[in-house]
Amino acid sequence: MYSEYIGLTSNKVKSVVERELVRRFAESIGDNHPIYTDENIGKQSRYGANIAPPTFPRVLRSGTIEGLKLPLKGLIHGEQIYHYERPLLVGEEVICYSKIEDYYEKEGSTGKMGFLKMKRYGEDNDGRLIFTEESITIITETVRRSLNV
């Protein structure tokens, strides 16, 4: 179904790790650690600044892969793994993009399921890697039928 997209990469998108967005994100996940929001704590930390929570990259835009159309509903979030070279600093610019790593199918009790593996990258302005995010999206038989595949 999506095998022809394996290896394709999105365009790169620049975002800023905005202080207010980090505050709202930390609040929404119930993590009130002061390293995310208290400027004095951030300045005194080993990073010299506030940092974003580990799952924060989820809200950063990472471009589009030409031709890739995923349904807006009915997908199942299968897995998500983050790897950091260093924390995301509040106020810094991050350049993000995505790559389709794999697509495979398995037979399930309700029909065929597709597994789309994507990897997102976040780099600084000098092209140095800050983080990667690997995710697997499960496409159920019901969703597959709605796409006429």
Image: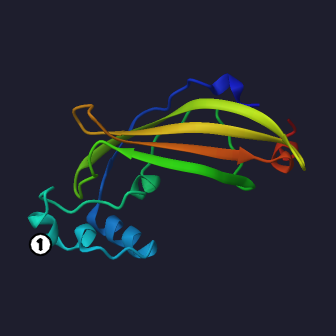
> Residue most toward the left?
44
User: Could you tell me which residue is drawn at 46 percent across and 40 percent down?
Assistant: 120
Residue 140 % position (x, y): 80, 48
Does residue 79 appear to the left or right of 21 in the view shown? right
Does residue 29 appear to the left or right of 22 in the view shown? right
Q: Quadrant of the N terminus?
A: top right
Question: Badge 1 is on which residue?
Answer: 40
The amino acid on which the numbered mark 1 sits, given as a three-letter code, is: Asn
User: Could you tell me which residue is drawn at 37 percent across and 70 percent down?
Assistant: 26
Does residue 55 appear to the left or right of 125 in the view shown? right
Residue 23 % position (x, y): 32, 71
Residue 41 % position (x, y): 15, 71
User: Could you tell me which residue is drawn at 56 percent across and 23 percent down?
Assistant: 7
Picture layout, residue 82 above or below residue 63:
below
Q: How is the image coloured?
A: rainbow
Q: Dot 1: within a 10 Å radius of its alpha carbon, few (fewer than 14), some, or many (20 or more) residues?
A: few
